[in-house]
Amino acid sequence: MPSVGGDGPMKRRTLLAGVGSVGVLVGAGGILSGAIPIDSFGEPRSANTPSGNADGTDGDGPIELETIEATGSEAGTLEVPNDGVTVAMFFAPSCGNCQALMPQLRSARDELKEEYGDDLTVVSITPEQDHDELREWWDEHSGNWYLGFHSGRSLASAYQVVGYPVVIIIDENGEKRRHMTGNPDARKLKYAIEPELEAYRERAAEAESESDADGDTENESASTKTETETETETETGNGSESETETESESETTETETSSAASA
């Protein structure tokens, strides 16, 4: 996958796509402020896990988001979820709250990136439109991370996002951890995102520790097996030496007996 300047190398899983209008729905832990409602996407299922394909069929695995070339972004695809925490912002260039949210998200992102690096992925998603005009808007409003469009399976539909601006936080397992609407400031964004990054690091450390423990157990088993095989080979070798000695003694006795008979 291509790499992107703003958020490091492309990661292994995907996220969603753009939303068509503006909304006020708030999920668990969300912040409600001045957004405009629109129709929801598809039949409601779980608010915290992907609900399937845009065509109504069940969909497993990550969602692939089309990204475009812009400041901090590169033409290609981004998979969500990925190895880390993904923050997805749904917006429309004409939305006033979306414009106000951009520098706040930039500030929170920059601060968190210093501490958490590639554990954090930020992506902004909008309906398909003229790329040149969008790039101009992006630079004007401090964008410096992945910029993508809805395509195929919709992240908005999968996570029941309605309207914009909406910010959702997704963990490495595809679980939606937070859902915020309106234009929270940088402090609120940071306080919402940082605990999820800490939780991710704890899970990653646990998984690594378990993997190391499994590796140690396998090494111990291999070592025990090798020792057992060595002991068996040694015993076999000793047995062969004893047989050789016995045969030699027998031959000596036969020789002595033969000599005596001749005498």
Image (spheres, rainbow, N blue to C red):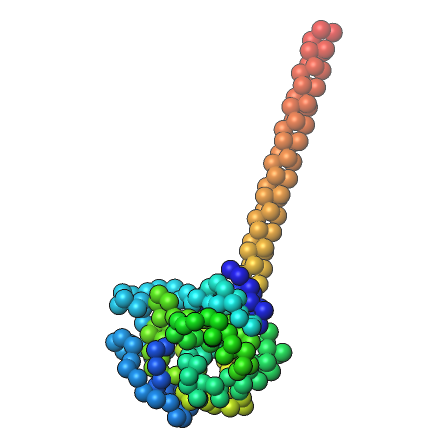
Which picture quadrant has residue 144? bottom right
Q: Is residue 215 above or below residue 200?
A: above
Residue 101 horizontal/vertical position (percent) = 48, 86
Q: Is residue 236 above or below residue 101?
A: above
Residue at 36%, 77% in the rendered image = 19
Residue 251 horizontal/vertical position (percent) = 67, 19
Residue lying at the far bottom in this picture: please name it: 33
Residue 122 horizontal/vertical position (percent) = 51, 75
Residue 89 in view of the camera:
yes
Which picture quadrant has residue 263? top right
Residue 257 horizontal/vertical position (percent) = 68, 14
Which picture quadrant has residue 63? bottom left
In the rendered view, does 165 fall on the left or right side of 142? left
Residue at 62%, 43% in the rendered image = 230
In the rendered view, does 102 fall on the left or right side of 155? right
What count of labels does the image hold?
0
Residue 80 in view of the camera:
no
